[in-house]
Image (cartoon, helix red, strand yellow):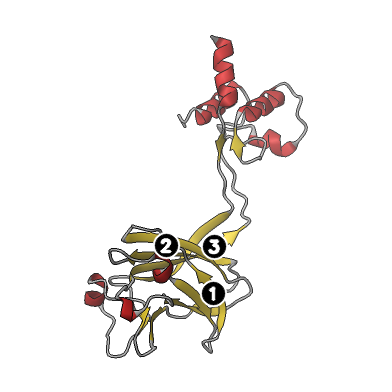
Amino acid sequence: MKKIYLLFLMMLTVCVVQATVADTTLVQFGRNHFEGWTYHRQGVVLDNNLISQNRVTLFTANNGDQYTLESPRFSCLGIDSLKVEISYKLDMGFNPTKVAPRIEVLDSDGNVLETVDVAVLPNVIEQNLETMVPVDGLTDVALLFSAPKAKESEENFPAVKSVKVWAVTTGVTVLVPGDVTGDGCVDVSDVNAVINVMLGKENNQQIIALADVTGDGDVDVSDVNAIINIMLGKA
């Protein structure tokens, strides 16, 4: 029975991959959150009623005008990239390629610095789309949202319900509880590392410090049990 239990533990691995951390909300759009935003459509006033009725639509009019949504300007100094989430409402029978949104990063003169096209799933009329937009080295920017392939003549108008933009820091080292070896996973190798510390066989000071999983100041069997509980999903 003990052999079976040990084999089961050896097969368990809890991994946490944390390559990016989205922390600060820089700008957002939606009901009660549209101050500073511009809906580029002549004669249309951006307000709560327009947003709640899904009438902030992105497409190219028959006269060639592009109806787009532009964020207020914000600082991205020291930020590697932006995480952008768009809540999107689509008409039945839409063509995913034609309604796909495009995000453009604009400088203070309106020049396009970066362009990101976002894929849309087929047959889902309400979607939460997420993408990353690089802004490394940029300072003061605005985001322009459009659907350049959506045409008025085809009566296929994607609507923006909400937008949220976060600052993202990449390459952040995140300590995972129980990950004594520092490989990003909690598994039997971490149990072995704690046992080696208990037996005085480990010289790596970082591993010795992380082996105190419970934080009680001692490395003992309680730390082994703590790791096993993490592996079993009990912690």
State whether residue 186 is above or below residue 165: above
Tell me, for residue 104, which label it has, or none.
none
Image disc number at residue 115: 1
Q: Quadrant of residue 107?
A: bottom right
Residue at position x 33%, y 57% in the image = 124
Residue 168's tag is 3
Is 217 in front, or is 90? 90
Amino acid identity at mark 2: Val
Q: How crowded is mark 1: few (under 14 residues within 10 Å), some or many (20 or more)?
A: some
Residue 100 found in image quarter: bottom left
Mark toward the viewer: 1 or 3: 1
Residue sitting nearer the eye, 178 or 112: 112
Amino acid type, residue under disc 1 in the picture:
Thr
Residues marked 3 and 2 touching at CB (< 8 Å): no
Residue 78 in view of the camera: yes
Q: In which quarter of the image is residue 224?
A: top right
Mark 2 neighbour density, 10 Å: few (under 14) some (14–19) many (20 or more): some
Q: Which of 151 and 85 is in front in this view?
A: 151
Numbered disc 2: secondary structure: loop
Residue drawn 27% across the image and 86% down it: 44
